[in-house]
Amino acid sequence: MIWLVGALLFWAAAWMLNVWIARQPWRQSMAARLAVPAIFGLTVLVVWEGLVRGLSVPGVILPPPTAIGARIAASVPILWTDFVQTFLKGALTGYVIGCAAGVATAIAVDRSPFLQRGLLPVGNFVAALPIIGTAPILVMWFGFDWQSKAAVVVAMVFFPMLVNTVQGLAAAGAMQKDLMKTYSASYVQTLMKLRLPAAMPFIFNGLKISTTLALIGAIVAEFFGSPIKGMGFRISTEVGRLALDMVWAEIAVAALAGSAFYGLVAVIERGVTFWHPSQRG
Amino acid sequence: MRSVLPILTVVMVIVALWYAGAVAMNKRWTLDQAARADQELTVAEIVADTLQQERPKLPAPHQVGAELWKTTGAMVLKGRAFSKRSLIYHGWITLSATLMGFAIGAGLGILLAVGIVHNRAMDMSVMPWAIASQTIPILAIAPMIIVVLNSVGVTGLLPKAVISAYLSFFPVVVGMVKGLRSPDAMQLDLLKTYSASPGQTFRKLRWPSATPYLFTSLKIAMAASLVGAIVGELPTGAVRGLGARLLAGSYYGQTVQIWSALFGAAILAALLVGLIGIAQRLTLKRMGLAR
């Protein structure tokens, strides 16, 4: 009972604090914009803990955050092996290959507007399909280890990357292209000095979409078969053993890895496309 | 219309590459069989054999097409469209979970977006999490949701629909917040000079100007919802649905079945997204927003 009341009181107090901060003149400051979501996140954790303990929900249905934290602290080596297997080997390799292939294909068809007109709708169409379904096929072709996971990731990130790059390469203005012509710049020079830099915002948009897809692809592909390590493998087996604290620990690691990956790409984007309006101001 | 020819060309190239790949990948098995039977095969015989194996590494397009027809159209003609061997039956199982999850997820998403737009504290506390959640592989929790809901006695359609709803929720929230904020200050000021209430502002300005964003995010949500339903079928032991067909096919090495389930899912996705696209065109035309 005390847990329930405590959780609800904490919720009310935190909400009032957030409303108060949102009404302050300094609400646009960095501190306020970080504090409000942080308080909200903390509230969710506290209410979760309070409800689980107060209603004595069994751990096989929903473990409290403290138990998950303890599990993370206790099984760092396992989590690290899984992280290396799924993220560094599977997702990252596939991400690099897939994105590079997408950009390379876009540049290869760049000189043929005919192919572009055909490739863009087909690419957009394929990008909306449940490509994750190719996972069982690719696991059959490339075996259970991380190579097949990388292949799934390649299949998932290729088309979003292709579509974004093709759009980006069309982004340079006619005036700028004319200027390059007056310099008598060759095709390659125009590409390297004008059109690729101008395409960077689009390319980075594709890269950011692909970070999430890469992690999803690598994890779900492990549901179809995997050596005895990897985040997807751990999730599916520990669910079978009803060890839900371990599952939540893996999910926490996946969430952290996903956000950090996205954040890293976003930071690189800030450095590369510093000139773009969305990065100024 | 002028892009029909380029699209056809690209599709033809893909099909040609597919056939080439089928020959290249299935050749090994054909040659092994021939060597075992002490036969010498001509190139034509090899090619012919690679395109009609029972369990090829890569089934040729016509094999997948034949399997698709056998499990859908042919079943309908026999009047057994909903037998367990029919892809229509499995597709329907997946479709119902998809649509239910989509309705729940999109509905809740729109509600939360309305709340975010009208309440600053909610905006500041929830919005960063809604954006951050898009960088998280949410699909990873699918097996857990299924098993947990099973253990508290909820089975059947609902667990899969929960995953679909969860996946389609966040794109709708983010898209709708953007849409409901799209009217510029001048238009909002105009409504203020009319002394419009918040409700009227919402009905007459915010909602109409959010409609294009709504349809765009509904398309993304529908695709995500279908993926959620398919992945949601994986941990249930592969009984019914397109995801179950994928898993069963991969257990028993039935590659043709995997590919036909995959294309079934792709056709389903294309139909659903296409339907939303048609609704979008019609609605925006009636609203005078079509370009």
Image (tube, coloured by chain):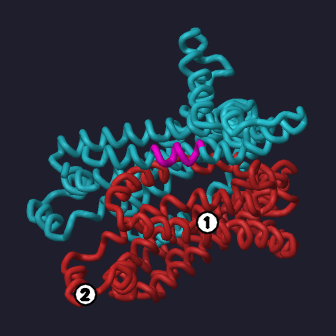
Chain colours: A red, B cyan
Chain for disc number 1: A
Distance of label 2 from label 1 (alpha carbons): 61 Å
Q: Is residue A173 above or below residue B53?
A: below
Q: Can residue A245 be seen in this view?
A: no
Query: Which amino acid, by three-letter code, is at mark 1?
Result: Val
Query: Which amino acid, by three-letter code, is at mark 2?
Result: Ser
Going by the image, does A261 lie left or right of B249?
left
- Is the residue marked by circle 2 packed among few (<14), some (14-19), or many (20+) residues within 10 Å? few
Overall secondary structure of the magenta stretch? helix
Residue nearest the viewer, comparing A206 with B224: A206
Residue nearest the viewer, comparing B204 with B235: B235
Identity of the residue drawn at 26% across and 52% down: B207
For disc 1, the marked residue is A44
Where is residue A98? Give x, y as percent.
Answer: 58, 66
Where is residue B233? Give x, y as percent.
Answer: 68, 40
**Residue A94 image label:** none
Q: In this view, does B153 lie above or below A200?
A: above
Quadrant where the image shows the N terminus of chain B:
top left
Span shown in magenta: B12-19
Which of the 4 quarters of the picture holds residue A184? bottom left
Q: In this view, does A43 lie above or below A25?
A: above
Q: Can residue A129 be seen in this view?
A: yes
**Residue A184 image label:** 2
